Amino acid sequence: MRGVSNKRLTTLASTAFTAALLLAAATPSWADDVKTVTVGAILPITGFLSTLGPPERDAMQMGVEDINKAGGFEVGGQRYTLKLKVLDDESNPATVGVTAYRQLVDVDKVPVLVIAAGTRNYQALFRRSPLPVLNILDSTYPSILDVDKHVFLLRSDTPAYVPGAVWYLKNVLKKERIAFIGAGADPYSAGIETWVKKAAEEYGVKIVAVVNYPLNTTDFAPFIQAAMAEKPDAIYLGGVTQEVLPVAKQLFQGGIRDLPVVHNSGVTPTQAKQIIGDPLYNDVMANNYDFAGTLPETSDNPATKKFYKDFVTRFNQYPSDLTMWAYDTPFVLVGAMQKAGTVTDRDKIYQAMLDMPVPANTISGWIPAAGGKLFHDRDAQTLSEGIGWCTDKKTIAPVFVYFMDGLKVTREKVVADGCKDR
Amino acid sequence: MYGQQGSRQRIRLGPAWDYLGIALLGIGLWVLLVVSNAFYSSVLATILIWTIATSGLNIIAGLGGYPSLVQGAFYGVGAYGSALAMKWGQPFWAACIEAVLAAGVLGLIVGLVFSRTRGQYFAIGTLFTGLVVALVLSNWQSLTNGLLGITVEFGFDSIDRLNAVIPAAAALSLMLVRFVSRRRLGWRLLTILEDEDLAEHIGVPTARTKLTGFVLSACVGAVAGVLIAQYNGTISPDLFDYYVGFVMFVALSVGGAGRVLGPLLGSAFIVGIPDLLNLSSGIGLLLAGIIFVAVIIVIPGGFMSAIDAAMAAASRSVRR
Amino acid sequence: MLIQAAVNGIVLGSLFALLGVGLTLTYGVMEVPNFAQAGVITLSAYAMLWLNQTAACPFWIAALGGMVVGGIVSVLTERIAYRFVRTRPLAAPVVALGLLLILDNTALILFGGDHVSLSPPYAGDVIYVGSARVPAVGVALIGTTAVALIALWLFLQHTRTGRAIRAVSQNAEAAAILGIRLERQYVVSFFISGILAGLVAFAYGPMYAVYPYMADAILLNAFVVVVLGGLGNVAGAAVSGFLLGLLESFGAIYVSAAYQTLFGFGVLLLMIVLRPAGLFTNRSRRVA
């Protein structure tokens, strides 16, 4: 190997400089196709949130296709169709997500950005190039709506469903000593912990232990043992599916089999089977209770039931609550653009979204705010649903439907025989 | 490149043409940064910021031959240090200096701890140091906000300023390595690379030299961290996961350790391949892995030595 | 409490011993930190998963198949990559990381990134030791480690190949002079290391889940064990594995569970600085 002399280094640098200039001159610019509107979304397709992104993408695709099949939509006398563009943030919004943000917002110039997580990470970018942002997943507490006034949340957030779980434990399952095991570093788990504590205080339930495990834990034995040392009569798990199910499995493997295990992760039977394993999952899930949004399968709305059937047929997967919100997203965008009378003016679309009505053809069961509006202070809400497990049918069934008004449980309905109709 | 006698780049004293070349390169990169669309521009900015961090690493690892896998921690300290200082009311320039100082102090401590460790033990030790730093910081919720990360206050007057500072800083970091390699510190580091025991026997103050090199590497790494925080406006713990330090070392080796332009080439490669080819991250990383292995086996000196060989062949054929 | 901590520690220790021994074997014959071992474990686990679920083999056959896959992949890493950097220890981290990326991402591309469970027939069973509970998968881990260590010891002490490997690991030049064919020993060590990786997959897979990065974190613990025991020292690694497991387990129960891994890493940093040669080794290997 030869050493490089001064002259060579200079030659090298100058060549590179010239190449850089030539490249710069040749950088192409892209023209937009005005007849198609891009629905731009940043979703966690891979990474520790990967149980959430793909179903959202699939359901959103179904929504886009249904709109296009019906002939697209019309704004200002021009007919448009929708195109879905999903970028993966790899569950890593601060490093991968920001690059995807720049692509969709600055290069592709989408009118509205759809995101699932990482709202806080985009805060500086919101300021640099503001546009309406629709978050279809992140219900963490403190609310992401506080991040920026352009952020909308298309689902109920943590305080709208967590307290119901504690209420159910106390009043239906008759339990009063909860041990909380959470993924402390995950903000979703931390928010759940806050609201479990608030609800417990309100309903007169004791929290006998709070244990948090660090990121990347795979052996939960010491944490489980610390929690069980306080002799709880129910276990509450904080976190998303991929965090909660392994803990439930290790609880069972550690011999803890007769305590109710409560969480808020929206687990589907497919995920339970895959993550816990067959045939173990049926026994592990037997005393699991999951409180989150409503399920498409058990809805009374025929359109929602149809969505359920189509999703199962097409993707061979059980759709959970978040699929309905994802499906509705294109309808919300079209509604906003039509109300604003533009497909490109971001500020007009933002103003329209603030007080738009609930769009027709949505299936999530949005509860309208005053005046029939979709968003109540930029948050759209549905009922909340608690789900239990049917060991004979190896699937989930509703046990409790409710709506939180602050810390008051309203519209509550205890479903005692949900497994019968499955 | 490592362990091969007589294969080290011999830096000759001479006119400052090299600095001019690097300056021109910096201007070219700035032009490219400004005219590209937002996506390509952000990829280039990330490459340039990585160039700064790996250039810093080049001092202790390239010139000195010490495989430091902890550069990621200093990168993270720069990012979090400056963001937190600003949150606590410091003006931007003060925050930068404080962050760099913090990294320097951490570098001093780590350097002292490993002052008698060499070779792969040094590699493992620094890797685990990075791991411990990352573990402590990401679980220290009250300080770093954990996984949520921190939103970073913008310290520049405008984005244009930031877009000018990034390539300027990258060029300066390359010039720094060029400069250091001509000074006493650089010569001493090179002797340590060649044969540390012999160097010690002939009177080179190896301990002090290594420590100085290490602290300098840490400080430059922190500067890169400050800039990535400013550029993205947000930082989170995976910025300085132990993995980052490892990848920075690989970027340097693949680009050409000990060579001035090595960090630029290596960073362009490591950041560019997954982002620009827009492959699903699995395929992108698989490709990157294959190329790491292939390059380091076939071209031990990294891309720079391949360019050397090509240019030497070209000049030979011209002369003929 | 005490019994539970001890039991947890032995389970954890078995995992660490198994990992550490696999890693130190290859360290002994060539001075390369084999981060790719994590990738071998992952691919081995996926092979077992595929055999068991897609190909509907009984679990034991799938486990054996996975172990063989582990051995083959490990040998491939040596033949295709490590072989060329034996004399260049500072290029080794690059190769190791490159291999890890290749192996992990092959798994990602072939099987997807979701967490999937590897389910042996005893996955749900529990065993009671006094007041302490041990999941059956934990018992399986202890048993596997015990069998593996005994088998390995017999191999290294009483077979010609085994003794040759020990010779190479002590002094490669002298071994070559004595007529031992070095290339063959490298291949054999990597193969055994791969089989051990397969055993880790078999024992550890059912405890959590199988996914492309499943072994990356625990491999770091393996490094602690290897350094504690002395690079290349198989017996040292085995003992250190159990020591580390007990240390982390008692630390988790009596000090703070959240920093369990931190104890291990802290130990490694102490060792590297104070006694890099390890607790048990007395060979004259240049370490600093």
Image (tube, rainbow, N blue to C red):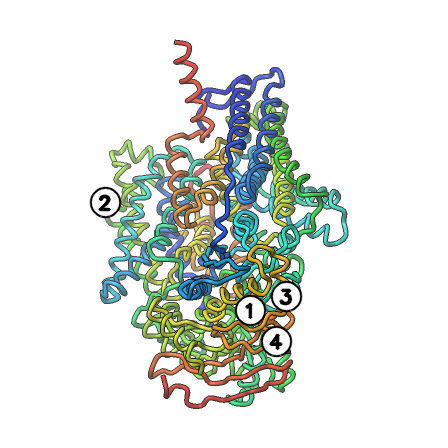
The percent coordinates of residue B185 (x first, y second) are 62, 27
Question: Alpha carbon of mark 1 to alpha carbon of mark 2: how far?
Answer: 69 Å
Measured as percent of width and height from the top left, residue B108 is found at 65, 41
Q: In whole angstroms, how far apart are the C-alphas of marks 4 and 3?
A: 17 Å
Q: Which chain carries label 4?
A: A
The residue tagged 3 is: A145
Q: Tags 1 and 2 in contact by the CB under 8 Å rule? A: no
Instruction: Where is residue B199? Give x, y as percent.
Output: 56, 25
Of circles 2 and 3, the one toward us is 3
Which numbered disc, 1 or 2, marks the residue closer to the eye? Answer: 1
Q: Which chain carries label 2?
A: C
Q: In this view, does C71 lie above or below A266?
A: above
User: Distance between the Cα atoms at labels 1 and 4?
Assistant: 20 Å
Quick one: SS at disc 1? loop
For the N terminus of chain A, give its image quadrant.
Answer: top left
**In this rendering, do the residues under marks 1 and 4 share a single chain?**
yes
Nearer mark to the viewer, of 1 and 4? 1
- The residue carrying mark 2 is C160
First in sequence: mark 4 or mark 3?
3
Considering every residue shown, the one lying at the far top of the view is: B320
User: Circle 4 sits on which residue?
Assistant: A195
Q: Distance between the residues labelled 2 and 4?
A: 65 Å
Question: What amino acid type should be assigned to the residue bearing mark 3?
Answer: Leu
| Chain on which label 3 sits | A
**How far separated are the C-alphas under marks 1 and 3?**
11 Å
What residue is disc 1 on? A154
Left or right, B248 with respect to A379, comes to left
Q: Which of marks 1 and 3 is nearer the N terminus?
A: 3
